[in-house]
Amino acid sequence: MKVLYINILYFSLPLNILVNSAQKNPSIIIHHTQTNRSLCECDLYMPNYDNDPQMKRVIQQFEDRTTQRFHEYDERMKEKRMQCKDKCDKEIQQIILKDKLEKELTEKFSTLQTDIQSDAIPTCICEKSMADKVEKGCLRCGYGLGTVAPNVGLLGGIGIHALNVLKPKAIADAIAVALQANNANITAAGLKAGNAAGVAEVVKLVESTFDVQNIAGQALELVFTTKNYTNSPTITQYIFTEFSNTCFTPESEHKLLCFYGSSSGASKVNPGLAYRPINAQVTSIVKQAEGAADVAAQAARESATNAIKAQETRVINTIFMSKQTAITASIIAIVVIVLIMMIIYWILRYRRKKKMKKKLQYIKLLEE
């Protein structure tokens, strides 16, 4: 320890010497401090839009819009809070009212006499549940059928319209098929009617032109047939034969047929002069008969065609009428069922309202 103290003393002596020498001899060296201009003193980091009026206007618009949107958001939130608050208030009031009613009813029933007869309380629970079931069933049926009825009516109307649109085409197709199938019959009917008319025309014209009622003792209807009424040479030969058989007797001087063989100034009949005028008259008669046959054949064909058209039209109309009747009957049936269901529903609803009214009166009486 003594050595340590001695060392401390020795060390303090040079320190005192240094301090005293510094005070006695002050330093005369002047240190100059140079001031440097740094970048921090420039305006490099200052914002260059502080004094820009356009940028100020943009910033102001942004702030205004942001403020307006926050304001609108606050208004919406206030409305939603008010709605939620009203809803909660209503639910709370309903709960409070329900609890109050339950409490009052419990108190009322607790103060009532216990000897109430079972028949004094209306036993309408079973009847009500049954009526409710029937009412709900009828209501469901009425709703279902009421929903289906317009669709059925619409589809029925569309079906009837489609039938009315398709009916003319069906009639035309049926007539075309029937005419094609009965083409031979129509042609045969026209040919038969034309031949009959041609034969009748030949007979009539021969009687009126030559004053002949029979040839070789046979009636003209038996001589002129459908096979030879258009054959001029055959008819001419028949008429000339009759001329040869009847015009050379004294009784036949005034017959019309015999004038075809006489000439002016001659008193006797010349057979050579009769053939040519008779042939000319027969040719004219045949042409007229052919024209009458064509007219009659055309009329017969048209009559047969019209008969076929009328028959096919009647058949198609009957078929379409049955379809329309079926559609109309189904629509009427559905409408009637809907009306019956709705009537039952209204009756049951009236009964339920009546029973509920009685129940409310009883509850009111109990509360009083």
Image (cartoon, rainbow, N blue to C red):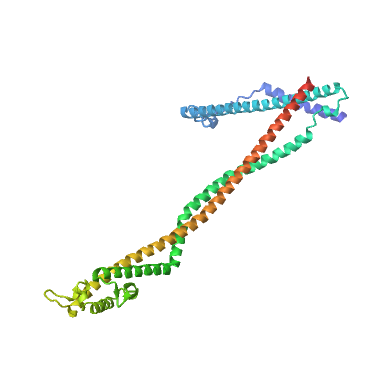
Is residue 96 at least partly visible in the picture? no
Specify the farthest residue to the front. 251
Quadrant where the C terminus lies? top right
- Front residue (pair 294, 142): 294
The image position of residue 315, as x and y in percent, is: 49, 58
Specify the farthest residue to the left. 265
Q: What count of labels does the image hold?
A: 0
- Front residue (pair 262, 172): 262
Is residue 12 at least partly visible in the picture? yes
Does residue 192 appear left or right of residue 163 in this picture? left
- Front residue (pair 360, 239): 239
Q: Residue at x 67, y 39 (%)?
A: 139
Q: Residue at x 76, y 36 (%)?
A: 129
The image position of residue 265, as x and y in percent, is: 11, 74
Does residue 161 appear left or right of residue 333 in this picture? left
Is residue 141 shown above or below 211? above
The image position of residue 299, as x and y in percent, is: 36, 63
Task: State which quadrant residue 204 falls in.
Answer: bottom left
Is residue 333 shown above or below 52? below
Q: Residue at x 63, y 25 (%)?
A: 27
Task: State which quadrant residue 168 falls in.
Answer: bottom left
Quadrant where the N terminus lies? top right
Is residue 166 shown above or below 289? above
Does residue 36 appear left or right of residue 220 in this picture? right
The image position of residue 338, as x and y in percent, is: 62, 42
- Front residue (pair 187, 208): 208
